[in-house]
Amino acid sequence: MAAEAGVSLQTVSRVINNEPNVRPVVQERVHAAVAKLGYVPSLAARRMGGSRSYLLLALNDRDRTIEGWRSGEGTDWVDQMLLGGMLKSAESGYRMIFELVDTHSAQVEREVQGAISALHPDGVILTPPHSDNPLITELLVRQGLPFARIGSVTPGDGFAIAMDDGKAAEEATDHLLDLGHTRVGFITGSDEYALSGARLDGYRRALARRGLPADDSLIGRGDFSFQSGVAATEALCDLAQPPTGLVASNDQMALAALRVANRRGISVPGQLSIVSFDDTPIVRFSNPSLTAVVQPIAAMTSMAAHLLIRSKSGETGLPATCILPFTLAVRGSTGRPTG
Amino acid sequence: MAAEAGVSLQTVSRVINNEPNVRPVVQERVHAAVAKLGYVPSLAARRMGGSRSYLLLALNDRDRTIEGWRSGEGTDWVDQMLLGGMLKSAESGYRMIFELVDTHSAQVEREVQGAISALHPDGVILTPPHSDNPLITELLVRQGLPFARIGSVTPGDGFAIAMDDGKAAEEATDHLLDLGHTRVGFITGSDEYALSGARLDGYRRALARRGLPADDSLIGRGDFSFQSGVAATEALCDLAQPPTGLVASNDQMALAALRVANRRGISVPGQLSIVSFDDTPIVRFSNPSLTAVVQPIAAMTSMAAHLLIRSKSGETGLPATCILPFTLAVRGSTGRPTG
DNA sequence: CTGTTAGCGCATTCAA
DNA sequence: TTGAATGCGCTAACAG
């Protein structure tokens, strides 16, 4: 390769890394040789010699992820992450390596440190609930590694990349209010996630803006599980004045609500309109399909990759916080209240 | 690190790599030091010095994969791959890197060669349709890289890892026959995939074993798309004597059959029992949920990782072909024929 | 059984 | 603007 272009090894390196101080003529010659030989530098060697590894490390919660895969419940969080992260990384010659880490284990630090030592990634992408785990973020700060916190809005180290959960819940609630509903219930997510609180707040804001009373009996406590969704929905349906509209903090709980409605002979959306959060594939296939808030997962990981790569390149002035737009997919589960 | 245990750098290497010729005492000492310092060797350096990279490369078809991600149709092929491949790899300190390659592009070889040059993986996992792409397999042979062909049964280089599609179709058909159905239809998949033919053969074998006539009008031609499933099902329903049972070669077409049945007021499973292939998450959420052949995707990639790692370790006597067991998940879409 | 030597393929630093 | 030396952190081959 060195000889093919009639230049030294270093010049090849310079051209490949787009460094200045190479005559266009020589650049061309090298590029031609590279194309001809199909030369691609070894990642490992680049990492050894230089200061970059061209690797991004994406960390997911082990138990949740494996459980999701095993159950086959159709959550496509990981797929959307790969879609956004991999494709964006590839644009800059980077790879994204996906790993699982146990957030609750006493060994979190050891696990994360191990992955870092082995891979020496140029940046780390954290997803909930890692995004708000100080054991992890502080370790990363100590290492001087740039990182992105997906789904986290709390200010702090690293890039915070999220959607506006509060506004989304507000909009979801508005959608029901616009349809004419006046009693709208809400099912919360697990308190372990900061976004759960944000979504609840948004719901409350929407009601308040319309001058509707804040009735805490309309708020069911859930934890993102189907089970908890069933329990919460049953409680709401048992009220003297049950809600005609319902916002659930994720798809599983919304599906649970749908199930309860079916069992009780409550028509959807006639007697109960349901809005869901997340928009995993399954909500398109339920009957009726669910109106849902669409999380920009791919866009968030894409942005994360973008920022981390830029950051490693020494670029400054990058936004510390990034709020990406969500959308509301209106489907069959919401309509005007009957009667 | 070297000093911490009071031994040479080389001895540390030996202990970490589980090589022989180290006194148990020294081993202990090194292990202790490793645990204490949380030492984890750098993958890049190991690849540079040694002959292994501790990397497995998994190659998927770019267009199909991205289209699947974008559409949000809930295919969890990638997730199941990761589940099987990543976890098995991790057991041996390996990582699996997932990449997308364009099978139909004239650049396949260049793309694959590029990934290999950059990563120097110890093995490559091919998924359909790459598994039977000679441009890729021959390139891998030339490189002397061990590889696994998922979903491929054709003998040849690399490990062939698949399920028995013929037997699965046979069993799916048997399930319907056992329930008392005597007219069972079949919707084929695209001829581009070898497994389509295998499934059709299995269906025919099942009928033959019961002494049932081979009625070609009961065989609808599909191509795995929802559209084609609709067309095939309509044709079957238009027969003078429509089938009371139906085996579809994938989930999309089975869902299409369900849709057609719903539109025509044909009750499922009462008047039409449906068996599906693949068992993607969505079939659990249709109404009724679909009885389906479950592909052992995770098991196949797990086996692939297992064999490749062993192979790289110089182990011989590994099976060239591996047929993994499928299961039949019986759900609400199949039952005894009524009347 | 253990330590020493050399080199993997690059990027970095300096010299030309 | 280019080329030559140096070293990254390991493992392989050999020496002791």
Image (spheres, coloured by chain):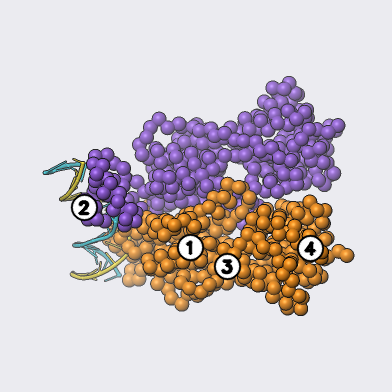
Chain colours: A orange, B purple, C yellow, D cyan
Q: In 3D space, how far apart are the residues under numbered discs 4 and 3 (Cα atoms)?
A: 28 Å
The N terminus of chain A appears in which quarter of the rendering? bottom left
Q: In 3D space, how far apart are the residues under numbered discs 2 and 1 (Cα atoms)?
A: 37 Å
Residue at the image point whose x is 53% and y is 72% from the top: A154
User: Of the residues tagged 4 and 2, which is closer to the observer?
Assistant: 4
Q: In 3D space, how far apart are the residues under numbered discs 4 and 2 (Cα atoms)?
A: 72 Å
User: Of the residues tagged 1 and 3, which is closer to the observer?
Assistant: 3
Q: Position of residue A244 (x, y in %)?
A: 80, 64
The quadrant holding residue A175 is bottom right
Where does label 2 land, which residue?
B6
Q: In 3D space, how far apart are the residues under numbered discs 1 and 3 (Cα atoms)?
A: 18 Å
Residue at the image point whose x is 77% and y is 40% from the top: B233
Where does label 4 land, which residue?
A239
Which mark is first along the chain, 3 or 4?
Answer: 3
| Same-chain status of marks 2 and 3 | no
Chain identifier of the residue bearing label 1 in the image: A
Where does label 3 land, which residue?
A194
Which mark is first along the chain, 3 or 1?
Answer: 1
Q: Nearer the viewer, residue A20 or A153?
A: A153
Find out whether the residues at labels 2 and 3 contact each other: C-beta distance under 8 Å: no
The amino acid pointed to by label 3 is Ala
Q: Nearer the viewer, residue B194 or A246?
A: A246
Tag 2 secondary structure: loop
